[in-house]
Image (cartoon, grey):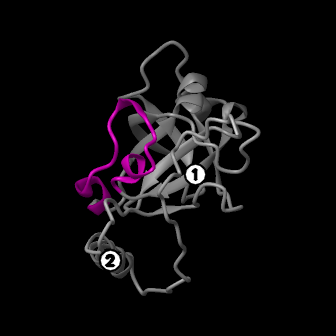
Amino acid sequence: QRAAPGYDSNQVLTFSTPNLRLPTPAARQAFVRDLRTRLLALPGVTDATAATPLPLDGRSSLARWGTEEALADPAKFQQATTHVVLPGYFEAMRTRIIEGRGYTEEDNNRQNSRLLIIDRILANKAFPGQSAVGKTIVARVNSPEPQRYEVIGVVDHQRHTDLARDGREAMFLTDGY
């Protein structure tokens, strides 16, 4: 009961959509935009966003990450949970943005976006005693080869798998990644 999950679930309703098997990323984005517009039109709804996986839903996705040093020494790669979120996710979940910013609609609409938001645990591991904003994280998210991502924000750590333990550090990507 005293765990700080990194978000406030009071008055938050979550649900999952079935795997829609839409033909293109653009079709998926259009579906999500339309659903979000319809949800925001409902009485009492103040925010609508999307994320996968959701906190405490029992799912997780892992990716390898490192700083530039990991390119020369692959043993320096570590694992983090990855989350795909839409703009407004941190605000809707009332997750504190420690530095930098959250995603914007412009970020979300860019294909192959190389922008990244990380949690404070990953920021402290990657850049101890420094600001992480503007720095580069190298990650294997959707390709076998590592790709460079620019850190645009650092958020409070969210407990996604268990309220009793912090869990792994996390990276948050937007839908356009």
Q: How many marks?
A: 2
Q: Residues within 10 Å of mark 1 (few under 14, many from 20)?
A: many
Looking at the image, residue 121 lies above or below residue 139: above
Q: Point out residue 53 in the picture as x, y percentages from the top left corner.
A: 58, 61
Q: Point out residue 122 in the picture as x, y percentages from the top left corner.
A: 58, 32
Residue drawn at x 50%, y 86% as measured from the top left: 21
Q: Which residue is mark 2?
A: 26
Residue sitting nearer the eye, 35 or 23: 35
- Residue most toward the left? 106
Residue sitting nearer the eye, 50 or 75: 50
Q: Point out residue 139 in the picture as x, y percentages from the top left corner.
A: 55, 44
Say which amino acid is labelled 1. Answer: Thr
Q: Quarter of the image holding residue 77?
A: top right
Q: Which residue is mark 1?
A: 82
Q: Secondary structure at mark 1?
A: strand
Looking at the image, residue 98 lies above or below residue 93: above
Residue sitting nearer the eye, 146 or 105: 105
Residue interval drawn in magenta: 87-109
Say which amino acid is labelled 2. Answer: Ala
Q: Residues within 10 Å of mark 2 (few under 14, many from 20)?
A: few
User: Where the C terminus falls, by quadrant?
Assistant: bottom left
Residue drawn at x 64%, y 43% as measured from the top left: 159
Residue 146: tell me if it is visible. no
> In the picture provided, is 23 more to the left or to the right than 63?
left
Residue 97, magenta (yes or no): yes
Looking at the image, residue 4 lies above or below residue 11: above
Q: Secondary structure at mark 2?
A: helix
User: Where the N terminus falls, by quadrant?
Assistant: top right
Look at the numbered discs 1 and 2 and tell me whether their residues touch, using CB distance below 8 Å. no
Residue drawn at x 55%, y 82% as measured from the top left: 19
Residue 122, magenta (yes or no): no
